[in-house]
Amino acid sequence: MREVVIKALLVDPSNNSPVVLLKDRDSRKALPIWIGDSEAISIAFGLQSEDFPRPLTHVLMKEMVENLDAKIDKVIIKDYQDSVYFASVYVRDSHGDVMEFDARPSDSLALSLRSGCQIFVADEVFDSEAIESPFAEEDEFHEFVEDDLNLGEFRRWREEVTEREHDSEDA
Amino acid sequence: MREVVIKALLVDPSNNSPVVLLKDRDSRKALPIWIGDSEAISIAFGLQSEDFPRPLTHVLMKEMVENLDAKIDKVIIKDYQDSVYFASVYVRDSHGDVMEFDARPSDSLALSLRSGCQIFVADEVFDSEAIESPFAEEDEFHEFVEDDLNLGEFRRWREEVTEREHDSEDA
């Protein structure tokens, strides 16, 4: 098992779907996980530490868990079968007991951003599904994520991809 | 305050957005609440008592609350300001204490379907925002919801509306 961090939120132009890149500290590889639009918005706001005007779903979930004297302990991407990732969210209650919840990676990642908990990936999953970072240099990757990833960019990407799709449909 | 039930999940053709109709037992009026696509899918599966292959967000939220010895007690649509509805979700813990969480109506309604809890609307909100039921007869309304509302229909509506939009853009 290895710890990863969310290094980028991109849009896959082949299917117009948001992708999260999970980067291992000790390698140049990243694990791409395709997610839904609403989870992407939640993750984008979480990455920017911005608040949405009204409580987003994962903020509400975290509030409920914490008000019940528990906390999100960690999330693990545990398995990959037939193009589907399987994750677990671990919740620690007030007695220190830890419960495991079967979850989709998108919910798990959105919760980890809200709660600040660690994200782990099973070695078998990372070894078989991780790809070379799309950035030639680690610095370039870092710069891209630190400086350029913001909500405005994210929205612009989505609009551009949508426009391209419309154009190709009209052609 | 009055109790309402989710009577229909439709698509508003003017903006291609899913709408939930909340119907009061004692009147012909219904309160329309516009929601996002992912919440609509969650509500559609909840209305059909169908399970999604992987845990949907609100199923995960309900599981966490119940495993922490608490339950979703009720939800209330409390206010409407500048075209935004405000709701609260009430959670009862193992000591019987009830906590209130500020929430969007879409999360509140999706949670109520999963937990089976009651939905209430503040009288001021219902009186000012409810519309006449789009169905001439109560029987017609009932028949539509009971017999015709299913996921296939929902998906077909969305596709039709999307096609119409594309057609009008091309025109």
Image (cartoon, coloured by chain):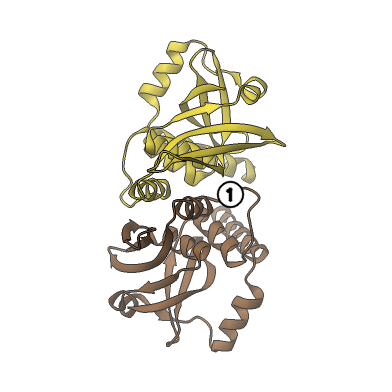
Chain colours: A yellow, B brown
- Along the line of sight, which residue is nearer the eye, B147 or A154? B147
Give the amino acid type for the residue marked by disc 1 in the picture: Pro
Image x and y of residue B64, in percent: 47, 50
Residue A118 position within the rendered picture, expressed as x and y whole percent measured from the top left: 44, 29
- Residue pictured at 52% horizontal, 27% vertical: A120
Residue B1 relative to residue A87: left or right: left
Which residue is located at x 42 percent, y 67 percent?
B33
Whether residue A159 is visible here, answered yes or no, is no
For residue B64, above or below residue B30: above
Q: How many marks?
A: 1
Tell me the quadrant of the picture where the N terminus of chain A can be found.
top right
Q: What is the quadrant of the C terminus of chain A in the image?
A: top right
Judging depth in this view, the residue of A100 and A4 nearest the camera is A100
Residue drawn at 72 percent across, 37 percent down: A82
Q: Position of residue B63 (x, y in %)?
A: 51, 52
- Classify 10 Å Cα crowding around label 1: few (below 14), some (14-19), many (20 and above): some
The part of the image, by quadrant, that contains residue B72 is bottom left
Q: Residue A166, image x and y in percent?
A: 58, 44
Is residue A134 visible in this depiction of the protein? Answer: yes
Return the residue found at the far right.
A82
- Residue matched to label 1: B55
Residue at position x 31%, y 39% in the image: A50
Say which element carries label 1.
Answer: loop
**For this view, does A63 lie left or right of residue A15?**
left
